[in-house]
Amino acid sequence: MEKSHELELTQMRKSVEKLGFSTEKYGDPTLMRFLIARSMDTDKASKMFVQWLKWRSSLVPNGFVVESEVPDQLEARKIFLQGLSKTGYPVMIVQACKHYPPKDHLQFKKFVVYLLDKTIASAVKGGEIGNEKLIGVLDFQNITYRNVDARGLITGFQFLQAYFPERLAKCYIVHMPRFFVSVWRMVSRFIEKSTLEKIVIVTNDDEKKIFIEEIGEEALPVEYGGKAILRAIQDVQVPTLEG
């Protein structure tokens, strides 16, 4: 950890204690993500960290979501975990044509935690979670109006912003149909500017070429111009890690 950030980290740990919580279980890399997300403002970062602790303990009391808690969401086999991109980030693909607005919103929220936790854990080396980031690919090919779930999209991005700060390296949106543009415009109003800047809508051959190059053919499935095969997230083994 850079010397220049030691002061902010110490101040943040003290601020969290003043709010009645402990940072004992968490290393500097975790706290740094919250500091970076709040422009190194220790008070704001501390409040964000405490909100995260409260949220995790209420939604994920065991520290992680087990597959038996999200059976309906897993059954669709709509999320894929593809190994590491050229830049070393795990690649997660969402095939929206297999998704329908959920009847059980609590299960859906747990599913978002499950897939983000598992994607991040797949990049961890040495057993300790640090500053691992992920690349998301949202594939809207073959979607119909029945697949449209603005609430689900907003939930996913808001979870990333509020509870998984500095985890998103990039999100590519591919095959967006014309009818979905107005839905996306509405969804993007709920997404912070710093997150929107990481979202790339792939619309032409040049952008597709950059998309393939940045992820790399080894991680990208054949369907998207790479050489890999699609791997459903529940078929991928990763270490179980908390937070």
Image (cartoon, rainbow, N blue to C red):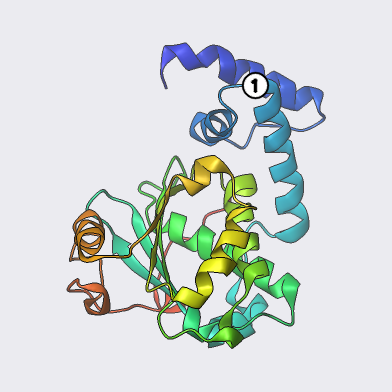
Q: In this view, does 77 lie to the left or right of 135?
A: right
Query: Residue 144 in the image: x percent, y percent?
Result: 52, 86
Give the amino acid type for the residue marked by disc 1 in the picture.
Thr
Does the image show residue 77? no
- Most foreground residue, 10 or 184: 184
- Residue drawn at x 18%, y 65% is 217
Does the image show residue 196? yes
* 10 Å crowding of disc 1: few (<14), some (14-19), many (20+): many
- Residue drawn at x 74%, y 82% is 103
Q: Using the rendered view, name the quadrant where residue 214 is placed.
A: bottom left
Query: Residue 206 in the image: x percent, y percent?
Result: 20, 59
Q: In this view, does 60 lie to the left or right of 27?
A: right
- Residue drawn at x 74%, y 41% is 51
**Kind of element beneath mark 1:** helix
- Most foreground residue, 8 or 174: 174
Query: Residue 157 in the image: x percent, y percent?
Result: 58, 56
The N terminus, quarter of image: top left
Query: Residue 101 in the image: x percent, y percent?
Result: 66, 80
Tally of numbered tags: 1
Q: Mark 1 points at which residue?
A: 42
